[in-house]
Amino acid sequence: MSDIERDEIITLTDEDGNKVDYVVIDGVEYNGKDYLALVEDEHLEDETCEFTILRVDESVGDEAILASIEDEEEFNKVLTLLKEQLDEEFEIDDIE
């Protein structure tokens, strides 16, 4: 994924209180909500890497509240939409 620029970096705090930088690699809209595909900044240059999908629940100015997608049907639909977009830009082998 070395073709991605690090223009949009989001810092999230994990369950243990550690701050982790993520690069926004893509985004889609589904059912009136926005979703972001994120890759940990430190793994962006890896030959293979995992990405995380989060829903944007609210935006206040420059701050966004991001949430995990709990509904399996919603997650699968968003994953399909993102895969279609990402396939056009990157070689995607398999998404689980």
Image (tube, rainbow, N blue to C red):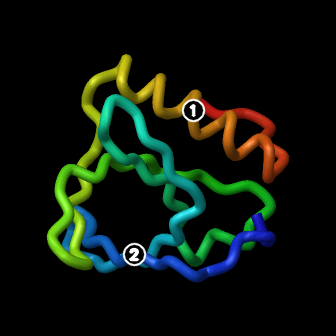
* Callouts 2 and 1 close, C-beta under 8 Å: no
Q: Amino acid at mark 1?
A: Leu
Q: Answer few, some or many: residues within 10 Å of disc 2's Cα (few below 14, many 20 plus, some between 14 and 19).
A: some
- How busy is the neighbourhood of tag 1: few (under 14 within 10 Å), some, or many (20 plus)? some
Q: Is residue 18 left or right of residue 22?
A: left
69 relative to 37 in the view: left or right:
left
Q: Nearer the viewer, mark 2 or mark 1?
A: 1
Q: Which residue is mark 1?
A: 81
Residue at left 68%, top 34%?
84
Q: Is residue 95 above or below residue 18?
A: above
Residue type for callout 2: Ile
Q: Residue at x 74, y 55 (%)?
A: 48
- SS assignment at label 1: helix
Q: Residue at x 28, y 52 (%)?
A: 56
Identify the mark nearer the N-term, 2 or 1.
2
Q: Residue beneath label 2, please?
A: 10
* Occupied quadrant, residue 80: top right
Question: Quick one: 37 or 61, which is closer to the camera?
Answer: 61
- Quarter containing the C terminus: top right
- Tag on residue 26? none
Along the viewing direction, whichever of 57 and 12 lies nearer the viewer = 57
Displayed quadrant of residue 6 = bottom right
User: Which residue lies at the image location 31% right of the left edge and 79% below the top edge?
Assistant: 19
Distance from disc 2 to disc 1, alpha carbons, whole Å, reads: 22 Å
The mark tally for this picture is 2
